[in-house]
Image (tube, helix red, strand yellow):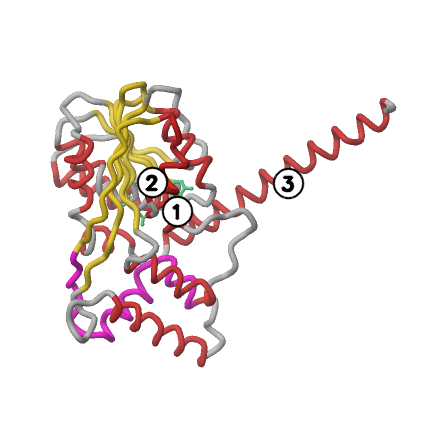
Amino acid sequence: MTDTTTAARTDAATDAAADAKAADAALKARHRTMWGLGDYPDVAARLIAELGPVLVTATGIRPGERVLDVAAGTGNVAVPAALAGADVVASDLTPELFVAGRAAAERAGVTLQWQEADAEALPYDDDSFDVATSCVGIMFAPHHQEAADEIVRVVRPGGRIGLISWTPEGFVGDLFKTMKPFAPPPPPGAQPPPLWGDEAHVRALLGDRVTDVQAERRTVTVDAFDTPDGFRSYWKETYGPTIVAYRNNAEDAERTAELDREIAAVAQRHARDGQGLTMDWEYLLLTARVV
Ligand SMILES: C[S@@+](CC[C@H](N)C(=O)[O-])C[C@H]1O[C@@H](n2cnc3c(N)ncnc32)[C@H](O)[C@@H]1O
C-alpha cells in the first residue's frame, strides 16, 4: 500500500468519525428538545413519583454515600436519595427539567448537584460513585451498550446500580410500540427504549462486570384521569414523545384520529376498569453490584 493510499484511508476514517459525532449530537439535541416539550415535571410528580423512593430502598442508599442519578429529569430518585442523606448528583440530557427539580429539592429542604450530561458519555471519572440509579431514564439513551458501559464505569467496585425501566409488555412499552408507526423514524443504530425492561437484555448489557443481579417485575397504579378524553388530552399535551408523534401527523386528520383511537386502546389493554382510567403500568426493577 502506498503512503498516498494510507493517507486517503485515514482521512476517510476521520471524516466518517466526524460525521458520526455530528449525527449523534443532532440526535441528542432532538431528544433534548422532545423531553423539554409539554410538561414532563407534571408526569413525574403526578403519575410516577412513588418510583423514586422504590429505587432508593432497593439500592439501600445510606447517609454520606455518593450517588449518581442518570437521566434524572426532575430528580424523582435524586431528591429522595438526598433526603436519605446521600451526596447526590442528578444528571440529565435536558437541563430545562432541572428548574422543577431544584424547586422540588428546595421544598424537600435538600441540596444536590444538577448537571447536564449524556448517559452515553458521562463526565465523571471511573469509580466515582457508591451508587448509580436511573428511573425510566437511561432506557431512553439510544445506544444501550454505550449507556450501560458508562453507568458501570462510574460506580466503584462493590458499589450498586439500581434501574427501573418500563417493560416492553407494560403500558409505556405498549404505548411506544403503538406510536412507532406515527413517530419520525429513529436513526439507524438507535434501539427501542423498552428493551431495557427485558431482564435478559439488561443482564447481557451489564455482563460479567456485575454480580448479585436481582430483577423483579412490578407495577405502578395510575388513576389520575377522570375521563378517557382527559387521558388522551393529557398525553397529547404533556408527554414529549407523544407530542412529537402527534406533531408528525398534524397535517393528516385521519392519521391523527387513528392515533387517538390507538392510544385509547393502549389504556384499555392495561386497565383494571372498563374505561381505562385505572391502569397498572408494569416496570422492571433491577439491582446489581459492580465487581
Ligand atoms: C421518562 S423521563 C425520566 C426522568 C426521571 N428519571 C423520572 O423518573 O421522572 C426520561 C429522561 O431521560 C432523559 N434522557 C433522554 N435521553 C438521555 C440521554 N441520552 N442522556 C441523559 N438523559 C437522557 C430525558 O431528558 C428525561 O429526563
Asked whether residue 89 appears in the rendered view, the answer is no
Q: Nearer the viewer, mark 1 or mark 2?
A: 1
- Name the image quarter holding residue 73: top left
Ligand 1 is found in the corner quadrant, namely top left
**Numbered disc 1: secondary structure:** helix
Q: Callout 1: 10 Å neighbours few (<14), some, many (20+)?
A: many
Residue bearing the label numbered 1: 140
Residue at 85%, 22% (x, y): give it: 3
- Image quarter for residue 276? bottom left
Tell me residue 101's x, y (percent): 24, 42
**Magenta region:** 221-246
How many marks on residues?
3
Q: Return the disc, 3 or 2, that comes first in the chain's sequence.
A: 3
Circle 1: residue type = Phe
Residue denoted by label 3: 19
Q: 9 or 88: nearer the eye? A: 9
Residue at the spot of label 2: 71
Nearer to the camera, 126 or 78: 126
Left or right side of 197 for 6: right
Ligand 1 closer than 8 Å to the CB at disc 2? yes
Which residue is depicted at the point 16% across and 29% down? 60
Picture quarter with the N terminus: top right
Q: Nearer the viewer, mark 1 or mark 3?
A: 1
**Mark 3 residue type:** Asp
Decide whether the magenta segment is chiefly helix, strand or loop: helix
Q: Quadrant of the C terminus?
A: top left
**Marks 3 and 2, how far apart in space?**
25 Å
Q: CA distance from mark 1 to mark 2?
A: 8 Å
What's the amino acid at mark 2? Ala
